[in-house]
Image (cartoon, rainbow, N blue to C red):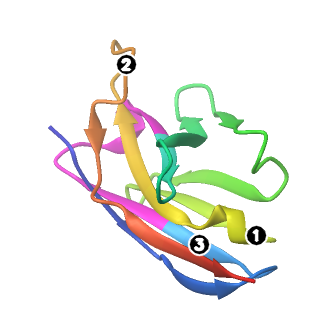
């Protein structure tokens, strides 16, 4: 089992930046593929970005490509999401998730952190 806790959300003006962090307890995150997802009011949860420690690969949704950066900090056992040039449509609850090496789904989820971008 791995427990995930997100932090760093808040209110920011359009064009601003926020840095989300996902801290883990119970397991070393480098064993997992890590992802960030978000859910806006009235919408389904959507994929934002993913990071694989094994191959150092990253993947982004088209809507955030070039603005968001996902990274892992092995020493702190955290995964971060740097969000720049934020837009009002980025407003959502952001969730951190982990997928095991042999799993095809993200099995572990944090509680989420609210990001609100004011126009």
Return the x and y of residue 87 as percentages of the image width and height.
Answer: 76, 69
Residue 31: image quadrant is top left
Residue occupying the point 74% across, 71% down: 86
Write down the residue under mark 1.
Answer: 87
Magenta residue check for 105: no
Which stretch did the figure color magenta? 21-34
Spatial CA span between label 3 and label 2: 26 Å
In the image, taking residue 52 as reference, residue 90 lies left or right, namely right
Residue 108: image quadrant is top left
Write down the residue under mark 2.
Answer: 101
Return the x and y of residue 35 as percentages of the image width and height.
Answer: 49, 41
Mark number, residue 96: none
- Mark 2 and mark 1 lie on one chain; the one further toward the N terminus is 1
Q: Residue furthest front?
A: 42
Return the x and y of residue 14 as percentages of the image width and height.
Answer: 77, 81
Mark number, residue 19: 3
Looking at the rendered image, the quarter that the C terminus falls into is: bottom right
Mark 3, mark 2: which one is toward the viewer? Answer: 3
Mark 1 secondary-structure assignment: loop
Circles 3 and 2, Cβ within 8 Å, touching? The answer is: no
25 versus 13 height, above or below: above
109 versus 16 height, above or below: above
Q: Residues within 10 Å of mark 2 (few under 14, many from 20)?
A: few
Q: Residues within 10 Å of mark 1 (few under 14, many from 20)?
A: some
- Mark 3 and mark 2 lie on one chain; the one further toward the N terminus is 3
Return the x and y of residue 25 as percentages of the image width and height.
Answer: 21, 54
Residue occupying the point 67% across, 36% down: 58
């Amino acid at each position: 089992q791995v427990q995930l806790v997100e932090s760093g959300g808040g209110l920011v003006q359009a064009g601003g930046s926020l840095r989300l962090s996902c801290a883990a307890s119970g397991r070393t995150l480098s064993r997992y593929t890590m992802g960030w997802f978000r859910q806006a009011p009235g919408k389904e949860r959507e994929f934002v970005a993913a990071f694989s420690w094994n191959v150092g690969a990253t993947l982004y949704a088209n809507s955030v490509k070039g603005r968001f950066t996902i990274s892992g900090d092995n020493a702190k056992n955290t995964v971060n999401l740097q969000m720049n040039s934020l837009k009002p449509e980025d407003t959502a609850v952001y969730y951190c998730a982990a997928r095991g090496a042999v799993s095809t789904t993200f099995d572990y989820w944090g509680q989420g952190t609210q990001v609100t971008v004011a126009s």
